[in-house]
Image (cartoon, rainbow, N blue to C red):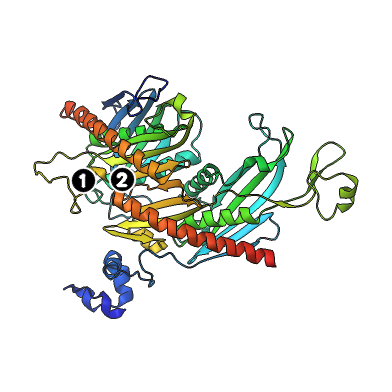
Amino acid sequence: MEVDRADGRTPNQRRPVACTRGILHRAHGSASWAQGDTKVIAAVYGPKAGTRKNENPEKACIEVIWKPKTGQSGKPEREYEMVLKKTLQSICLLNVHPNTTTSIVIQVVNDDGAVSFTLFPCAINAACAALVDAGIPLKHLAVAICCCMAEGGHILLDPSKIEEQKVKAFVYLVFPNSMVSVLPQGSLRPGGEQIEHGIITSVTHGMMAVDDYFSCLKLGRAAAAELSDFLRSSLKSKAGNDPSKAG
Amino acid sequence: MGGSVNGGATDLSSEMEVDAFRRLFPLRFHERHLVESVRPDARPLGKARETSLALGAVGSADGSALAKIGCTTMLAAIKMEVMTPTTEAPDEGCVAIDFHMPAICSPIVRPGRPAEAAPVVSKQLSDTILSSGMIDLKQLSLVSGKAAWMAYLDIYCLDADGALFDAALLAAAAAFSHLQIPVVSLNDDGRIVVVSKQNEVEKLKNKPVNEEKRKLKLKSIPFALTCILHKNYILADPTAEEESIMETLITIVLDSSCQLVSLNKPGGPALAYESVVQDCIALSRQRVRELQTILNEAISDMEVD
């Protein structure tokens, strides 16, 4: 490839990923997700009785609390909380535990990003692993990835802190994980499109051409498939050793 | 429309009044309409509500506008203040954007407690406006390194009936096109003061920094369209009722040259496939042209007055 990245990666190469589950003793489910130098811990508490005001009591309510690395949470954190909440709502089976609240606390441990847009995908992945750890019923998993447009018009996957300062636009995308089905057409939806090609969440920042967005989408989709395999194998490896958590 | 809603159901919904059916089975009420490619307010699926724009709605502000999309009403006003620019950007001004949802706008907002949606819309607005490059911050400079303009843009939601972000962005863009930068002069202490009507005498004494009121030159203005994705349907410009029933929203912001400024889909039960995103972008392109015409008309009406 003709594009040189500061850390020697190819344009469509992710940073190394690590995922650990069950790291917090008192939480009902917890996970940490590290991607390069970005690290996030997610804890899940619940389902607890009752829903908050203005929420539908016929469904389970999801509450997200975002704690930044330092300082108080402001508007960006509010936005993260809202997007994360809506994303997780779409993957949880909300009808299983009606009139309950599940809290997800996201703590940023290390942030390898000035504008911190590598943070959000990490938080989604961590929250997802923590929900699995807590045994919250889910429709499918969600995998998140960030792509950015570098100044020369190249698309880079999963930018690091040094690269962030030079990009003109970025996209973060959340896809459903790839399904493993016994039926040959198991993961096809009626229209013939694969479920994992559908976007759960997409947030963009900065100007780009419409075609570039679709190129990012393609790149993100390929990376999400890889990530979803990683997530699946890391969840499998620790399935079963679930000591009952202190309540 | 009474005859069209009895969906062939065997339960009591077949003999119910339309209003009762709408409240008890809101999703079925809407889906029954969607099958007929029409919405409860008689719009086709891809059509936005009637949009109007009035510039100069707030007399005391330097720039203001009132935007209405259907019942959703946004009042935007800009107040200019002189500030010292930061050392990193000595010849640039600054824009601070805030979005307010007072208790008057919707039954789910309670007085005293800030609405959940307000900080999120506020953040999205500032991201969109600043990243779209609509305002060249260098135009807000007065004396390099010494003084520059700080533009405080406040947007008040008076009636929240869906597509809040679209209306807020339209009001913001209109307020900036109405903005007139006031005349300022250097006083004896070497500080910059705004020349108002009361101290015109001073104006003669001290040479003004800028001779007369001027307008900002806006580059490509961003316009937004929010769509609902529900099953195979795409509903443009939803009302609050539609937003509460069908929860998947996708907001696309394009500028006048159809560059993508933002594509925001925060979760929701429906997945957005590539073909759906293409369709939404096509709808937004159409809407950008509509909104551009509405904005141009509002500006030319203003200049005639």
In the picture, the quarter occupied by the C terminus of chain B is bottom right
Q: Give the secondary structure at mark 1.
A: loop
Name the residue rendered at 42%, 51% in the picture. B252
Camera-nearest residue between A111 and A217: A217
Q: Residue at x 43, y 56 (%)?
A: B285
Dot 2 amino acid type: Ile
Query: Which of the two labelled residues, at mark 2 and mark 1, occupies the earlier sequence position?
Result: 1
Q: Badge 2 is on which residue? A: A199
Horizontal relation, residue B19 to residue B63: left or right: left
Q: Report the amino acid beneath label 1.
A: Gln
Dots 2 and 1 on the same chain = yes
Element type at mark 2: loop
Q: Position of residue B163 (x, y in %)?
A: 45, 58
Of residues A87 and A147, which is closer to you in this image? A147
> Relative to residue B104, is residue A21 drawn left or right?
left
Q: Position of residue A8 (x, y in %)?
A: 37, 19
Label 2 packing within 10 angstroms: few (<14), some (14-19), many (20+): many
Local crowd at mark 1 within 10 Å, few (<14), some, or many (≥20)? some
Residue matched to label 1:
A194
**Residue B101 appears in the figure:** no
Q: Where is the N terminus of chain B found, in terms of image quarters? A: bottom left
Mark count: 2
